[in-house]
Image (tube, rainbow, N blue to C red):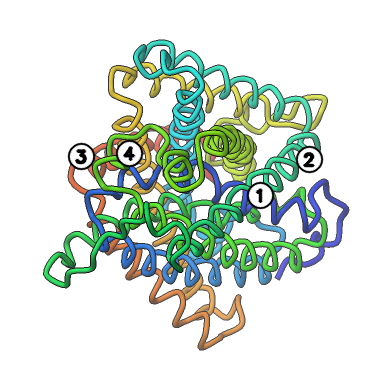
Amino acid sequence: MSSGASRSSGSLGFWMCLALVMGNMIGSGVFLLPASLAPYGWNAVFGWILTVAGSLCLAFVFSRLARSFPAQSGPYGYSRLAFGNAPAFAVAWSYWISIWVTNAAIAVAAVSYLTIFAPVIAAQTGLAAILALGFLWTLTLVNCLSIRAAGGFQLVTTILKLLPLIAAIGITFAVAGGAGSGKAATLPFRSEDISLQAITATASLTLWAMLGFESATIPARRVEDPERTIPRATMLGTVLAGGIYLIACSGVALLLPPEVAASSNAPFADFVARYVGAGPALLIGLFAAISAIGALNGWVLLQGEMPLAMARGGAFPRLFGRLSTAGTPMVAQLVSSGLATILVLSNYSRSMGQLFTFMALVATVATLVMYFICSLASLRLMQQGDMRRSAGVIAAASLGAVYSLWTFYGAGGEATGWGAILVASGIPVYLLMRRAGGSRA
């Protein structure tokens, strides 16, 4: 174990790490996914249950890896210890892609909720793209100026986003319990509508909302007492976020008419408007935008840290390993946001709902490569004697690997194809780095 470096003072304590985990998970998904899941009815509820269970298995694996190797920079470091340079590069490259694709999707989600205040945004796709990129580049600037400021911003936005979610869960229980039954129209459960294919499809979408439970492992070198802080923040954040998602999203999916949810740019606000009123719905819309912006901030932080770790491991050009005078990976930030910008501009003609769903699935496919290899890495490290053997970790890693493969299948042909192309695009980079002698054994 590399615990020697774990006691150094960092910029991120437990509460900031918990905010990073929950803030990255609770972003746009809880507010926009009901529109994507509406056609699946009760299948989505079962998809959520399986996704939360699979995510908890994977989060447990990451928490144990972080405890055993606190000096490693997350998935790249774990896979490199277990399998060497090539698999580690595949993990880091695919995860980096998933991060900037995620940032593009979250920026679109933030703008989508602003349409309830300014409907003209939804009618002009070019305007929506410009606003999304405005959010992206503003938070890129924040993360370039100060990691601690970015962490503080994450903590504040996480607290703000939890308040309306707690209220929304209360509305769900009240409506389900009979209060406001005059407007309630719970989607009836029919066993003949439940299918494994539909559940598999929803699991790929719902996993998008759970992406981020590994967030605290990425900036490990900036974390105070990482061998204790990261595992605690990872597990607690996953449990809390998973419970909130399961209740809140299921409530919207089952209590809002499917045709309304499916065509809505702000399904959560429409849900509140139906059962409480238009005024509170506008407030939900505002908090939804704040939630997405907070998540975007957390993911922007990670889009700089991952290339930094790769560059320091010799798997990426040294330019990405340079720090600004503020100690931030400015080059990595600028390149990552530049790629997200290209993705948004090249797909801006899609509706916001279609654009969000497409990007969510592509990001999920790219992330699944990392989840699968890191699950195998934990098993390998235990076999090598580098990590303490544990029946719980073996079971969680095995289930996590199977779950990753199953969700990959459920993502569908288009997203899987785009994900495969993006991951394969890293092959020339890896070969060039090897030729230059940068990929060290």
Image coordinates of residue 270 in percent, x first then y, are 42, 39
Q: Secondary structure at mark 2?
A: helix
Amino acid at dot 3: Glu
Determine contact: label 2, label 3, CB under 8 Å: no
Distance from label 2 to label 3 (Cα)? Answer: 38 Å
Q: Where is residue 429 shown, x and y percent of the image?
A: 42, 33
Helix, strand or loop at mark 1: helix
Left/right placement of residue 254 relative to residue 304 reads left
Instruction: Report the residue that reaches farthest toward the left.
Output: 192
Q: Amino acid at mark 1?
A: Leu
Q: Amino acid at mark 4?
A: Thr
Name the N-terminal-most of marks 2 and 4: 2
Give, as a three-letter code, the residue at label 2: Gly
Q: Which mark is residue 68?
A: none
Q: Nearer the viewer, residue 6 or 312?
A: 6
Q: Alpha-carbon distance for marks 2 and 1?
A: 18 Å
Q: Which residue is mark 2?
A: 152
Look at discs 4 and 1 and give the one toward the viewer: 1
The residue that label 4 is drawn on is 357
Coordinates of residue 425 in the picture (x, y in percent)? 34, 34
Residue identified by numbered label 1: 163
Point out residue 57 in the picture as x, y percentages from the top left corner. Answer: 48, 72
Q: Residue at x 73, y 66 (%)?
A: 2
- The quarter of the image holding the N terminus is bottom right
Label 3 sits on residue: 414
Q: From the viewer's perspective, is residue 198 above or below residue 423?
A: below
Left or right of 34? Residue 441 is: right
